[in-house]
Amino acid sequence: MQSIPKQISEYINMGLSLDMVKKNRSVYGANEISSSKRIGFLHMLFGVVTEPMILLLISISIVYLLLGDRGEALLLLGSVIGIICITFYQEKKTETAISALRSLASPRTNVIREGKIIRIEGKDVVYGDLLILNEGDRIPADAELLSDRLFSCDESLLTGESIPVNKGIGQLVYCGALVVGGEGVCRVIAVGNHTEIGKIGRKIADETVGKTLLELEVARLVRNLFLVAAGLCILLALYFGIVKSLWLQGLLSGLTLAIGLMPEELPLVMTIFFALGAYRLSTKNVLVRRSSIIETLGAATVLCSDKTGTITKNKMKVGKITTIDSEENLEKINEVSYLSKSILQIAYFASKHPSFDPMDIAITDCMNLFHQNGDLSLLSIKDFPLTPEQLTMIRVLKEENEYSCYAKGSPEAVFELCQLDSDHLKYWTNKTNDLAKEGYRVLAVAKSKIPLKNIPEERNTAQYEIYGLLSFLDPIREIVPSAVKTAYESGIRVIMITGDYPETAKNIAKQIGLKNSNLVYTGKEFTNLEDQEFKKVLKECNVFSRVSPEDKWKLVRFLKSEGEIVAMTGDGVNDAPALRTANIGVAMGERGTDVAREAADIVLLDDSFSSILESVRIGRQIFDNLKKALGYLIGVHIPIVGITFLPILLNWPVVVLSAIHIVFMEMVIDPTCTIVFEKEDAEFDLMRRKPRVSSEPLLDKELFITSLIQGAFSLASVVSTYWLTHMFLNHDSNNQVVSTASFVTLVFSNLFLILANRSLHESMWSRMRIRNSMINIVFVGTITVLLLSIYLPGMNTLFRFVPLNFLQFSSAILVAFIGVLFYDITKVSVSKWFRNV
């Protein structure tokens, strides 16, 4: 027998006393979500400073200080401080996500204390408090419903289910849910970390965010180059000391060798690439919370997407209107029949206004769409509300001197209300089942057959006639099917994870074009599978329904353990653990909760599914351009190191480069890497490639070989100019003419290598058709400074240059061009060979 709900007045004396409030707060804790894992400042600082990249930058700074270049040393030390600050910011991001959960879990609420109803902050709620909840309230803690009057709440933030849930006495209501109907009194049974939201918050806090693939790659590459440079530095110092007894010269030469070998630009290049990439994405309504994640998104192999609010709009909409004679699909027509308009009006008058119920809102929107606003002057005289026993909503309206009953509710309840005969019952039941299989949520609509003279005492006092069915859907976002197609073309698998019904999930999967859309597993089904069985399921199944937050989290972790690079989209509190666990968490900005946004790496400000693919494209472009920059860096350092030490080691007559010349080259290399290659447009086949394998290094075999080849050709050009000028063009036997001409070849070889490295696979001639405005700036700026350093009195003294005649200058440029031309031809051949292997 159903308990009769008590009136609120009967609970006035059942609230907590102030002493009990204090006691419960001390025993059960405050109603706040906190992290269990706090890392001390010094421990965090030690972990950051001992990173190989930080040690590298500090070492290079010391080298510059030993050479007397305080400006460069201070610049690098400044970058060290910047990286430490960024790392600290990332460590604090978890606490920011927890703060967002605290904010969501702490609305104002009415409680009964000391025999009074008072309004307090949600954070002040304690275990055992009596809450009074009304329509529109956000529930501040997990509680048990003691008394209800048609109580229903929207738990989509927790479950992903967009349909409101009816609650009865003895059932639990959860922190963060929104009351959409009725009112109730409930007793708090869990606060803070012990609520369902609190458990999610703890999971976010305890989930470690690792470095991106590229950060690990660059750290490893720089560390290895650091070890190579250190080894060569020691060997060179020992050579000078033991063989020539020049220990000080050996030390200085070794330190200079380290400067020439170390690609100290690479950390800066990566930082700037990501920063500019994040800015570019922001202009496309994509907010990047951790800029280095862009590259990882470019390498994504699996995109796990929540349905509600991500693939769909999380907004109920009337999809079909079914009458006894016809069925109208509102997606395909601009006008509805007279009978359909009548059905809409009946449903409208059977609904409360205003209402938080998404179906009531959908009915009103549909009325407005077809300009059917109804007679708003009609007032409800009496309501027969929806109850667990009576799944119909009936409102009695006065029309002149008579009364009419308007009803809507579950089809079975309305069929019973209308007392249908067997034929009509079979017809409407079959229609309802067919619509349910299509993924619709169905309501039946009825009205009293004849006007009543008196207000009915019971809902079944009147005789009702069924008018038809209203079918509701949560429509997909229009851009999603094309985005899914683009994902497949890019080699990215799309998996839909939802808390919705299997049939609804299957229907949505078909609409958006998911592969194997007929195969659906529920969370309960795949949780009970053995690991080997689940691996087989995971290879084929792209639709998972009735999935709990815990299931989502486990699914993402399992995909990661299989070597997949997982991007997870979501918008609700229930998505936060999976967003945090995934390689890339992508939150919806418009409809997403603060919790989801703070837990994610990327936020789609316009909630557009296609923006994810734009992020993939830019991520891949950044990685491509980083490889071009890295190849260029290695290539230009080889001739710098070679022409610095070959004359010393082989006792050539002229020493070409000194420290100031290396600084000049660094001034050319830095802007080239950070401006020219970052600005380079994507190559034609960028989004037709498969995602790169996670184990593929940034410096792969092809890039390493082509980098060595370009460096060798560039060094050969400088050496050729050295001997050509020394033996044939240096008529005055001035050693500075040789060093000046060699430096001109080195600079122009560097400029021509920029053109050759604009594509990893195409020739520089084919790439000329694609404009890059930064190239002109770098060329003009570099050549201008070069000419001034050679021909401007005082400046050429600083650089120890002498003016060259036309033949010497043009010969140096020609030799540089020939060397790079040979490299460009070789590069295309090497690329074809690697692609055919």
Image: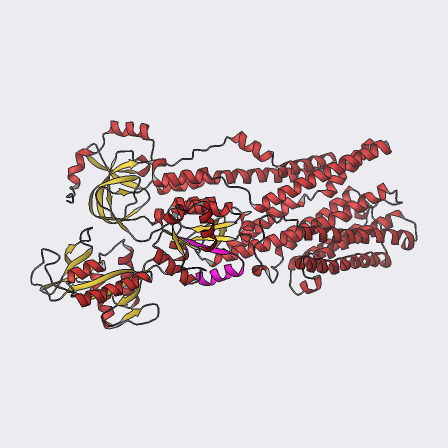
Q: Residue 775, located in which quarter of the rendered image?
A: bottom right
Which coloring applies here? Answer: secondary structure
Q: Which residues are magenta?
A: 476-497
Q: Position of residue 823 (x, y in %)?
A: 75, 57
Q: Position of residue 433 (x, y in %)?
A: 28, 62
- The relative height of residue 532 versus residue 516 in the rendered view (above or below) is above
Q: As rendered, which of 492 and 35 lies closer to the eye?
A: 492
The residue positioned 22% from the left and 62% from the top of the image is: 444
The residue positioned 67% from the left and 59% from the top of the image is: 836
Report if residue 494 lies within the magenta region.
Answer: yes
Q: Position of residue 440 (x, y in %)?
A: 31, 61
- The relative height of residue 201 versus residue 687 in the rendered view (above or below) is above
Report if residue 251 lies within the magenta region.
Answer: no
In the picture, the quarter occupied by the N terminus is top left
The residue positioned 66% from the left and 65% from the top of the image is: 769
Residue 546 shows in the view: yes
What is the total number of numbered labels drawn onto the structure image?
A: 0
Question: Left or right: where does residue 563 sit relative to residue 228?
Answer: left
Question: Left or right: where does residue 342 sit relative to residue 802?
Answer: left
Q: Position of residue 219 (x, y in %)?
A: 62, 42
In the picture, the quarter occupied by the C terminus is bottom right
